[in-house]
């Protein structure tokens, strides 16, 4: 019994009209270190986005006066009028927490990239690989 990949490979033997050439290739191996490097770079980029986004959101909330309103609300509820939300959750504290989360994301993202490359390389032994079609136009 032939697999779907073999049926698709037989279809590529027919000439394609219009001067375009179609090629079907199987992805049977993902280089481990390339996957680790790529996942590391993507995780670093996402970490930078996380830190900058956190800073921008905090600045927007501070400029709109949300923190002052929440401090007043918590002060009324607790009866302590000296409570300040910005003293507890200031920009340095929020950015510090954001940096810690970004570092953890870099470590976990890199590890997941490595694990996914290993799992793909192991699953290729069972499935035969991923069939990818390309064409030039």
Image (tube, helix red, strand yellow):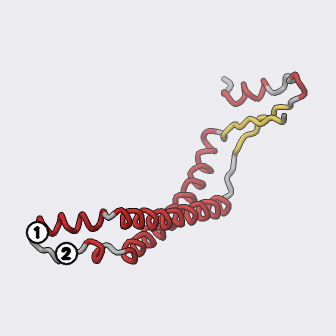
> Which of the 4 quarters of the picture holds residue 95?
bottom left
Q: Which residue is mark 2?
A: 83
Taking the spot 60% from the left edge, 49% from the top edge, the residue there is 120
- From the viewer's perspective, is residue 34 above or below residue 119? below
User: In this rendering, would 101 be left or right of 114?
Assistant: left
The quarter of the rendered structure image containing the C terminus is: top right
> Which of the 4 quarters of the picture holds residue 82?
bottom left
> Residue 31, image x and y in percent?
68, 57
> How many marks do you count on the picture?
2
Taking the spot 88% from the left edge, 24% from the top edge, the residue there is 18
Q: Residues within 10 Å of mark 1 (few under 14, many from 20)?
A: few
> Residue 119, image x and y in percent?
56, 51
Front residue of 22/119: it is 22
Q: Secondary structure at mark 2?
A: loop
Taking the spot 77% from the left edge, 36% from the top edge, the residue there is 134
> Residue 44, image x and y in percent?
56, 66
- From the viewer's perspective, is residue 33 above or below residue 82? above
User: In this rendering, would 110 be left or right of 20?
Assistant: left
Taking the spot 52% from the left edge, 61% from the top edge, the residue there is 109
Q: Can you name the residue that lies furthest to the right here?
A: 19
The answer to whether residue 50 is seen in the rendering is yes
User: How far is disc 2 from disc 1 in space, using C-alphas?
Assistant: 9 Å
> Residue 116, image x and y in percent?
56, 53
Q: Secondary structure at mark 1?
A: helix
Going from the N terminus, do you reach mark 2 or mark 1 first? Answer: 1
> Which of the 4 quarters of the picture holds residue 36?
bottom right
Q: Which residue is mark 1?
A: 78
Q: Residues within 10 Å of mark 2 (few under 14, many from 20)?
A: some
Front residue of 31/39: it is 39
Do callouts 2 and 1 mark residues in contact (Cβ within 8 Å)?
yes
Front residue of 41/129: it is 41
């Amino acid at each position: 019994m032939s697999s779907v990949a073999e049926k698709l490979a037989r279809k590529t033997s027919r000439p394609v009209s219009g001067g375009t050439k179609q090629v079907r290739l199987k992805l049977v191996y993902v280089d481990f270190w390339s996957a680790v490097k790529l996942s590391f770079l993507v995780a670093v980029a996402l970490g930078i986005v996380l830190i900058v986004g956190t800073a921008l959101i905090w600045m927007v909330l501070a400029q709109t006066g949300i923190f002052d309103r929440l401090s007043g609300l918590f002060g009324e509820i607790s009866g302590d009028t000296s409570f300040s939300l910005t003293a507890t959750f200031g920009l340095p504290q929020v950015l510090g927490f954001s940096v810690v989360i970004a570092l953890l994301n870099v470590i976990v993202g890199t590890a997941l990239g490595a694990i996914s490359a290993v799992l793909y390389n192991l699953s290729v032994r069972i499935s035969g690989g991923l069939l990818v079609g390309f064409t030039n136009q």
